[in-house]
Amino acid sequence: MGTLFGEGVKTRIKEKLLSECNLHTIVRLPNGVFNPYTSIKTNLLFFTKGESTKNIWFHEHPYPPGYKSYSKTKPIKIEEFAAEKAWWNNREENEFAWCVSIEEIKANGYNLDIKNPYQ
């Protein structure tokens, strides 16, 4: 697990980061985006420096129709981010997007591995 998804000292790092920066969006990419180098899920984090986090929006990037995984021969393509781009300036919760308050993040020990409540 990476720094933002662990406990202990990692919790204090997240606490400081979320109080000094606004982590406003986490885009969760599916398994295989960086195959063959790693098969773990990857997250894109979007911050605004100088203001504290109030809410974090999560957007789960789905596989395109017909895909069960990405690979060297079937990589992720920029065109696949059309849904995130359309959602970005008009955010509403849906089957791929949900919002979590900083109070909920704090109550869960600053754990940022928040599962999609719609799945």
Image: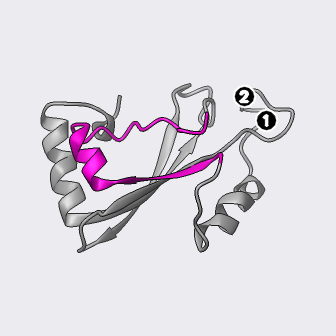
Task: Please indicate whether residue 59 sits to the left or right of residue 13 in the image.
Answer: right
Q: Residue drawn at (64%, 45%), measured in percent from left and top? A: 61
Q: Does the magenta stretch include residue 111?
A: yes
Please provide percent x and percent y for residue 28: 54, 44
Q: Name the residue under label 1.
A: 74
Can you say whether 117 is above or below 102 in the image?
A: above
Q: Find the magenta span and give its range.
A: 95-119
Q: Is residue 50 magenta?
A: no
- At numbered mark 2, what does the secondary structure look like: helix, strand or loop? loop
User: Image point 64% across, 52% down: which residue?
Assistant: 94
> In the picture, which quadrant includes the C terminus?
top right
Looking at the image, is mark 1 or mark 2 earlier in the sequence? 2
Q: Which residue is drawn at 70% across and 57% down?
A: 81
- Looking at the image, which residue sits at the far right? 66
Label 1, secondary structure: give it. Answer: loop
| x then y, percent, for residue 95 | 65, 46
Type of amino acid under label 2: Ser
Residue 69's disc is 2
The Cα atoms of the two marked residues, 1 and 2, are separated by: 8 Å
Quadrant containing the N terminus is top left
Which one is in front, 102 or 14? Answer: 102
Q: Which amino acid does label 1 sit on?
A: Lys
Q: Relative to 6, does residue 16 appear above or below in the rendering?
A: below
